[in-house]
Amino acid sequence: MSEVAWWCSTQGGPWTWSWRPYVGVWIIVAVLLTWYVVGVVRSPSLTRGVRSRFWSFVAGLGVFVIAADWPVAALGASHLLSMHTLQYMLYAFGIPGFIIYGVPPDHLRRVVSRQPIRSLLKLFNRPLPALIGFNLILLATHLPNVVDGLTATQMGSFVINMAWLFSGFLFWWHIIGPLPEMNPMSYPKRLLFLLANVFAPVVPASFMLFSKFPIYSTYELAVRVGSLTSIDDQRIAAVVMKVLGVFILLGIGSVLFFKWNRHENDPVLEVIGDGG
Amino acid sequence: MQVHLKKAARFVIFPLHSMMRWIQIKCLAAFTLAVTAACVPADKRRPGDLRGFVLPEGRPKPSFVMTDTEGGAFDFRAETTGYLAFLFLGYTNCPDVCPVHMANLGAVLATLPSSLSSRVRVVMVSVDPDRDTPERLRAWLDQFDRSFIGLRGDSTQLAELERNLSVAHAVVSDEDEDRSNGYLVGHASQVFVFSPDDSLRVFYTFGTRQSDWAHDIPLLLEGAADSQ
């Protein structure tokens, strides 16, 4: 076992399959799980849909561990751009959806009433700022100098990962629309919001796919893993971002469409809303 | 009256409110762009500038004969005259610098038109000839480019070459310890580039990127180092 680190950042040398613990990841998981079990599961107000919400929250934490811990994070920070891109997909499109759905509305209300989340929601509860925020974070965190500069340190790497997570919350908040009193968008608007988020990932994905040379020095100057060249790895990363991204967005779009259909055909849901 | 006042207030307050939101969004966007811009250093290089380290004066190409991976004698000076020759001292068990240098050079040569790549010779001299058998050296180099030339010499030849290139002598780490589990060799990480007229004009340190090689190789073949 190698030395303990707070967060995963770029390491020199060849890739080895020796496990390396990242303490920050496990502390975050422990804190969130404790909060959930103590504050949410034991709460008397949680009577409806407890099981699915609990497992959704646990799935969110599971995806977080996959994205932030060894080996995906270690490969993504030091060796393979494709893993770095997979991390982005997990942070932005995986974790927040499970977490937002996993927290029951009563508890979510309590969370969003606290600062600084309340202030953030004042701005980002509108779809346009959320759209801009999500896409700006996506573009800024894929600039070569940002990636090469920040992934080199644990703090920088942590900042990138948290920025991805934040952008994911901006995205999923409007897709799920968990609190009826916060004026969630109608389903057609949610589908439009989803569609509007399809375009920005094309920019970094196109650079990755069509660039003649590797665009990130971190991965170009890393010792290769297996026989994969840095340019092939970069192309795989582009495919991960584009193809996996399209599948995820298509999946979300299908779910939204069927929920819209159910919503339209159910007069009770139409009146009270279905809470996402 | 009150209704009219309310309407008027709404007429004024709503645009102000929207404006404030827009200012917030623009501030966020400006902040993100400013942070991003701060991370992007300005590139002060001119297009014709070489990206390697250009020596103030050219130095003569070293003359040495070592054994290539086929077992034949390879006269470095004679065999590379008229070519742009890249000389690197490395070893096949190297965990980082050597495979990265070789992989990047191989990848760049594959992207160049054959009219250029055919005028380039890449030569790696092993600093660990005990482990780098001809077969092993050949197989290792073939991963990157089958045209790369691997050479082995004795310790005297290697020391002479290192002195000639003004680099530190390659040293085995943990020399006193048991070598059965493998060992590392500390060695120079520069790639020395000799122009077709047999002089050393420029060298490249670890960190040189494929785009740098691709930028410099055509310039070096045109003799750009002579004018810098």
Image: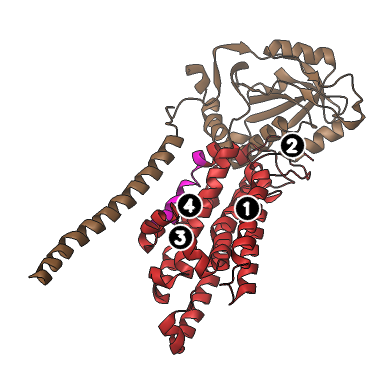
From the rendered image, report the letter of the chain displayed in red.
A
Query: From which residue to which does the magenta span run?
Result: A132-146
Check disc 1: other Cα within 10 Å, few if <14, some if 14-19, many if 20+: few
Q: Earlier in the sequence, mark 4 or mark 3?
A: 3
Q: Residue at x 63, y 36 (%)?
A: A221
Query: Which tint was used for chain B?
Result: brown
Where residue A138 is drawn, which disc sits there?
A: 4
Q: Earlier in the sequence, mark 2 or mark 3?
A: 2
Mark 1 residue type: Val
* Residue B92 lies in quadrant: top right
Magenta stretch secondary structure, dominant: helix
Disc 1 designates what residue?
A31
Q: Earlier in the sequence, mark 4 or mark 1?
A: 1
- CA separation, marks 2 and 1? 23 Å
Q: Earlier in the sequence, mark 4 or mark 2?
A: 2
Give how far across and how far down residue B49 sits, in percent. Answer: 47, 25
Disc 3 designates what residue?
A112
Check disc 2: other Cα within 10 Å, few if <14, some if 14-19, many if 20+: few
- Foreground mark, 4 or 3, reads 3
Give how far across and how far down residue B8 sits, in percent. Answer: 12, 65
Give how far across and how far down residue B158 sits, in percent. Answer: 79, 16
* Secondary structure of the residue carrying numbered label 3: helix
Where residue A3 is drawn, which disc sits there?
A: 2
Q: Is residue A199 above or below residue A216?
A: below
Mark 2 residue type: Glu
Side of A149 where B79 appears, left or right: right
